[in-house]
Amino acid sequence: MKLENLTLIAESHGKKLYRDGDACIKVFDKEYSKADVLNEALNQARVEDTGLRINKIRSVDMIEGKWAIISDFIEGKTLAALMQENPEKKEEYLELFVDLQLHVHSKTSHRLTKLKDKMSGKIDLSDLDPTTKYELHARLEGMPKHKKLCHGDFNPSNIIISNDGTPYILDWAHATQGNASADAARTYLLFWLQNDIEGAKKYLDLFSIKSNTAKQYIQKWMPIVAASQSVKGNEHERQFLLSWVDVMDYE
């Protein structure tokens, strides 16, 4: 298999997505950690066991000296693309989006990494001062411990609506087990990162109502989530996320 013979369909930092017939091939840069690639494949395989509609793994391979995860290709459009193409239906799409996330949270996968453990490690790696890190660790430790399946990067671009209208949830690299409100806080911040402030507010309102969760409780997670996510991404994203740590009240 040669990459030049495949159809490039998307790319992001450190990885490219190709299509080969009914297969989707995610190819990682040579600098990408083998452990991270294998962990992503393992996460996806474990999520498959929950029965959720996802693109199932076919194999993990080496292509031209690069690690690759090969999975099903889902023909369709992302929910993000549909929102752009049909702005008059955005609220309808947001309803579907939140319903899908709640469906994810209804599942469990006890062999996944614990969300609290992952966030604690990320806070340690952040550029925050020791006092702020201490306060964040204290808040994290005080949050209720749950075992719900959390996607970790749940946004409209990771939802594919197939040609027959069936939704599939993609990209399980950051999947953990833990508190659903932390997952919702992450999604809220992702809307902000896309400069969709109105979408962020509507999303939070919908999630709060549909999950019967107080918005204030979700907001308590935001400085923790922002700090843990600040260790990745570009400088603009890091500064934005760290600003959420600064402005949120610890009391």
Image (tube, helix red, strand yellow):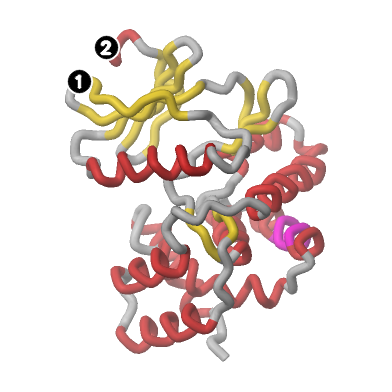
Q: Where in the figure is residue 161, as x and y percent of width and height?
A: 67, 29
Classed neighbour count for the residue bearing mark 1: other residues with Cα under 10 Å, few (<14), some (14–19), many (≥20): few
Quadrant location of the C terminus? bottom right
Question: What are the residue bounds of the magenta stretch?
Answer: 201-207
When asked about the image quadrant of residue 169, the answer is top right
* Residue drawn at (31%, 73%) of the image: 124
Badge 1 or badge 2: first in the primary sequence: 2
Q: Main secondary structure of the magenta part?
A: helix
The residue identified by callout 2 is 2
The residue identified by callout 1 is 64
Nearer to us in this view, 238 or 180: 180
* Residue drawn at (46%, 17%) of the image: 23
Instruction: Specify whether residue 192 is in view.
Output: no
| Three-letter residue code for mark 1 | Glu
Q: Where in the figure is residue 98, as x and y percent of width and height?
A: 72, 50
Q: Are marks 1 and 2 in contact (CB under 8 Å)?
A: yes
Instruction: Specify whether residue 112 is in view.
Output: yes
* Residue drawn at (31%, 82%) of the image: 129
| Disc 1/disc 2 C-alpha distance (Å) | 7 Å
